[in-house]
Image: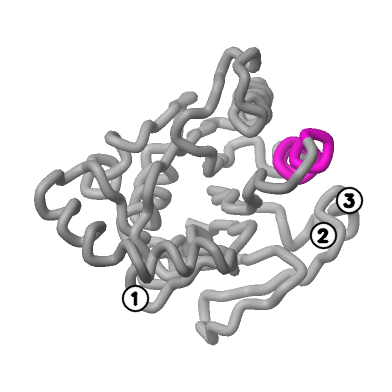
């Protein structure tokens, strides 16, 4: 497979990149974004592009791709609905609309979140915006659209969140998360789980699927 990763410097993106580079059936990994990743691997290509709302000029680099793992996102904390929608909805749909023109047989995997509101009518701002993003992605003529709704993810292998508050949370909650994974298998995902689930979603490659948190571990180990 040839795959794209958006948001490769974030926690989920780092995990996805790690698993893609390790997977024998992935021949090329292209990461797209403003900030370069530090890995050095023969499979890895980097496209430095500041304006994801306008990918014109990147057609050759972003064509002939089997799967896109869209891991780009921000916390809604402190943001207005307009600002959050621009990053979460506008950027995602702009990228997806560009990619589907050049890769209609692609699998597009989008990292949403547990509690996303598919009705787009609920009280939670972030959940409404994520819901609209999911709904409109499913309307695009990709071969497959897979929507991940993870809950708590425990970082492994030195992977860290870019958000300071989240990094502090993981340090403080580490003993609890480790115990919870032992006592309640399926409740807590690891970064390894979500990276492997990404790849397995691409390997199955057809249809529209919403994958809830409790189903992601099963997909990772399929």
Instruction: Check residue 85 for magenta coloring.
Output: yes
- Quarter containing the C terminus: top left
Q: Residue at x 54, y 32 (%)?
A: 145
Q: Is residue 177 left or right of residue 104?
A: left
Q: Nearer the viewer, mark 3 or mark 1?
A: 1
Q: Main secondary structure of the magenta part?
A: helix
In 3D space, how far apart are the residues under numbered discs 3 and 1 (Cα atoms)? 34 Å
Apparent side of residue 217 relative to residue 194 in the rendered image (left or right): left
Looking at the image, do the residues carrying marks 2 and 1 touch, with CB atoms under 8 Å apart? no
Residue assigned mark 1 = 157
Mark 3 or 1, nearer chain start: 3
Is residue 172 positioned above or below 124 on the image?
Answer: below
Magenta-highlighted residues:
81-93
- Callout 3: SS: loop
The residue that label 3 is drawn on is 54
The one of 175 and 61 positioned closer to us in this rendering: 175
Q: Secondary structure at mark 1?
A: loop
Residue at (83, 35) in percent of width and height: 82
Q: Nearer the viewer, residue 154 or 56?
A: 154
Taking the image as shown, residue 3 lies to the left or right of residue 181, namely right
- The residue that disc 2 covers is 58
């Amino acid at each position: 497979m040839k795959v794209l990763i958006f948001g490769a410097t974030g926690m989920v993106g780092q995990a996805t990149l790690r698993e893609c580079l390790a997977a024998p059936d992935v021949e090329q990994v292209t990461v797209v974004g403003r900030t370069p990743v530090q890995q050095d691997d023969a499979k890895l290509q980097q496209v430095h592009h500041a304006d994801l709302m306008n990918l014109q000029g990147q057609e050759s680099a972003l064509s002939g791709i089997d799967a896109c793992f869209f891991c780009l996102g921000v916390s809604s904390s402190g943001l207005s609905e307009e600002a959050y929608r621009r990053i979460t909805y506008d950027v995602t749909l702009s990228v997806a609309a560009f990619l589907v023109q050049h890769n209609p047989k692609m699998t597009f995997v989008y990292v949403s979140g547990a509690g996303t509101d598919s009705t787009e009518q609920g009280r939670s701002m972030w959940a409404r915006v994520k819901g609209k993003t999911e709904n409109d992605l499913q309307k695009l003529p990709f071969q497959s659209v897979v929507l991940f709704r993870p809950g708590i993810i425990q970082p492994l292998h030195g992977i860290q969140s870019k958000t300071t508050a989240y990094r502090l949370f993981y340090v403080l909650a580490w003993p609890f998360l480790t115990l919870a994974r032992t006592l309640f298998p399926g409740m807590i995902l690891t970064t390894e789980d979500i990276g492997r689930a990404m790849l397995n979603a691409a390997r199955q490659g057809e249809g529209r699927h919403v994958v809830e948190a409790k189903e992601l571990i099963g997909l990772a180990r399929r």
